[in-house]
Image (cartoon, helix red, strand yellow):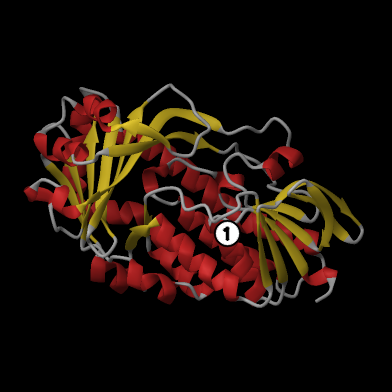
Amino acid sequence: MSRSRTVLVAGAGIGGLAASIALANSGFRVLVFERNYQPDTSGAGIQLSPNATRALKTLGVLDTLAPNAIEPSELVVGNATSRAILATMPLGTAMQDKFGAPYLVCLRADLHNALAKIAGSHPDIELRYGSMLTDFASHSRGVTGQVERDRQTEEIIGAALIGADGIRSQIRTHLYPGTAPRHGGMSAWRATIPMDALPEETRGKKQVRVWLGPGAHLVHYPVADGKEINLVAVTTDAQMTESWGEEAAATDVVRRFSDWNEVPRGVIASASQFRRWSLYEAPLLSPWGKGVVTLLGDAAHGMFPFIAQGAASALEDAVTLADNLRGAEDVASALRNYERNRMPRTTKMQSAARNVGRIYHMPKPFNFGRDMVMERIGGAGLLRQNEWIYRG
């Protein structure tokens, strides 16, 4: 296939793989460059709301993922100190009936593996692990990327370059120097634990549970065919790290929740080891790219995890990107159209995630007012608040 139909993608995470599949399905040849020598499956669990699973279906990946995913029956929000149930939002068939797509939970590795399986078997996608796109230059023929592998440098020409290289994107830094991500003053402590290690009260339930406490919250749900529980606890934490998942002792995490009630505290205490992530937010850019170069996923709009839309928004990006590039004669204009189509929604998502985080972590005595509001609006109110997300 000619250079004019070749797209370079930096990053083989969820966004990069999704973009490669969407573009290849639209008639492009795609070269994906990933600096790691093997697929990066860091992270524990992931929630996939109907807008995400709808995108996965469009990409042809949903059926591959489905055997390794769980469709929870409900989302339950509770107060972490009093044990009071604040709201219960139906999932399961309610999501299917209202939005035409399921709400799933799974291991992040399972989603990544499903995407990698489809991308790796596509005749128009080439995955180059251990290859880093270190520099690029736009010109009249498109873009030339400088790729390094095993200390060897190669120049590759393509019609476009997609920066899907994460929250600390080198492509974004090249386009817009000085656009480092913003630390949110929080850390996420993640673990995956056997279901039978949980306190009996929380064992075996197909629920997404959210516990809210002053300056912290906890989310847990079943994964791995119900044999395990994914756990993520988020706390205020000024310590910054660029490591993805540095190990943390369980005792260091448990002590942060000493004033919580015994049920969520027992869930946290069931983990033998945690991995810690500092939480960052990508800077607000307009536009995301220049010429025949653009950004996608966390590189463009990395957001805090409080509305569980980081991966979902990257999947949406991939579908929209391919829709805009398909049949386009002016690649740069098509990329600006993609950005204009996506920016209002992702900007709103970033803002919503920030606001939900403030609500989740509301300190005393203001959390009493929050709890009263949540109890009054209930699950139906939560669903109305999230409907704009789930409809896509």
Q: Position of residue 369 (x, y in %)?
A: 20, 31
Q: In this view, does 41 lie above or below 373?
A: below
Closer-to-camera residue (71/98)? 71
The amino acid pointed to by label 1 is: Asp
Identity of the residue drawn at 52% across and 61% down: 315
Identity of the residue drawn at 19% across and 60% down: 206
Closer-to-camera residue (350/293)? 293
Whether residue 391 is visible, yes or no, is no
Q: In which quarter of the image is the N terminus?
A: bottom right
Count the numbered circles shown.
1
Q: Is residue 3 above or below residue 367?
A: below
Closer-to-camera residue (310/265)? 265
Q: Position of residue 62 (x, y in %)?
A: 43, 72
Q: Is residue 196 left or right of residue 43?
A: left
Q: How crowded is mark 1: few (under 14 residues within 10 Å), some or many (20 or more)?
A: many
In the picture of the structure, the residue carrying the numbered disc 1 is 317
Name the outermost residue toward the front: 150
Identity of the residue drawn at 39% across and 34% down: 247
Q: Position of residue 169 (x, y in %)?
A: 64, 42
Name the outermost residue toward the right: 140
Identity of the residue drawn at 44% across and 39% down: 245
Kindly indicate the quadrant of the structure image that contains residue 82. top left
Q: Position of residue 211 (x, y in %)?
A: 22, 40
Whether residue 370 is visible, yes or no, is yes
Q: Is residue 125 above or below residue 216?
A: below
Q: Quick one: SS at disc 1? A: helix
Kindly indicate the quadrant of the structure image that contains residue 331. bottom right
